[in-house]
Image: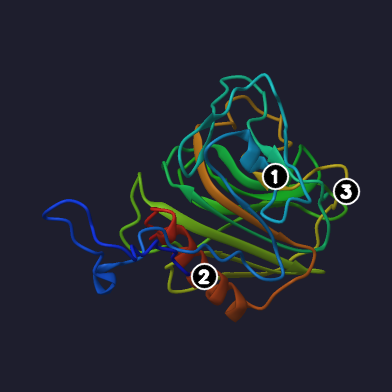
Amino acid sequence: MPYLFTRLNFEVPFSGAEYLNESDVSRVISAVTPQPGFFNWLFGGSSASLTSYDGAHVMTQADATLTKTYGDNYVQLPSSTGTLKNGLQTEWGDTSIYTWCTVIQYSGAASQVLGGATDNSTGEAVQMSSAGAIVFAYKESGTGTTKAQAIPVPAGLSAGANIFIGVTRSGSNLTAFVGGASTKLALTAAKNANAALKIGPGNTSYTGASGYSKELRCYEFLYSTNAVSASDLDSIYAAAKERCAARGISVL
């Protein structure tokens, strides 16, 4: 990153003045590199951050009556004791080929949707189960029955930690990953897809039970219309950690 300084080319007209020692200059604002091949949302500041990094795509609120709060580097999705949806929706509907990733603050609160797109009988999402576990829940193809599998988490995960979550699907093959975990969840599972459900962070679509919108702090969200490999998720996680560190966010 270049820096521009004005050099004085005349005698300094007061005593004690010194020229800048340029060897002492250090970068105080790190560059942020968006994830290649993805649409990137880096939240914070204001609702202007609901526009993607490239300026081409805008998230919308699933329920605008739930007021979002913006910090310097995050958006706080509010809770609802009823069935209002606190999520932010991209323009992309639930499908069988995609990748989405997000960095959130883990609260440990049970029974909430963290990201994806699901309703009573279609779609899929990463959720906190009623037992307080991070699970991948999908609506089984043909029946609409909810099927859920626990996603491995990093050792020592506790409330307040910032975590990376990545999900990629290609047909019936799905991988879900919480950054820092020693293993990933790999599933072969067909689902009831529903293009009318829009993918995004938080609870974008589910109204089947009260209270599934809990307070959720979101730092970034990535979306691709393509699937990636399990090893690609590792690389995306590493890049997200670097990107978040440049924004003052420590990710587990």
Q: Is residue 179 visible?
A: no
Seen in the picture, residue 215 relative to 241 is either above or below; the reply is: above
Of the numbered discs 3 and 2, the one sitting upstream in the chain is: 3
Seen in the picture, residue 65 relative to 40 is either above or below; the reply is: above
Q: Position of residue 182 (x, y in %)?
A: 43, 74
Residue displayed at 12% across by 53% down: 15
Q: Which residue is identified by label 2? A: 239
Task: Give the quadrant of the C terminus.
Answer: bottom left
Disc 1 element: loop
Q: Which residue is identified by label 1? A: 51
Q: Nearer the viewer, residue 99 or 69?
A: 69
Q: Position of residue 93 (x, y in %)?
A: 83, 49
**Dot in front, 3 or 1:** 1
Q: Nearer the viewer, residue 109 or 217?
A: 217
Residue flagged by tag 3: what amino acid is it? Ala
Q: CA distance from mark 3 to mark 1?
A: 21 Å
**Dot in front, 2 or 1:** 1
Residue flagged by tag 1: what amino acid is it? Thr
Residue displayed at 82% across by 69% down: 171
Label 1 neighbour load within 10 Å: few <14, some 14-19, many 20+: some
Q: Which mark is residue 195?
A: 3
Q: Position of residue 45 (x, y in %)?
A: 52, 37
Q: CA distance from mark 3 to mark 2?
A: 29 Å
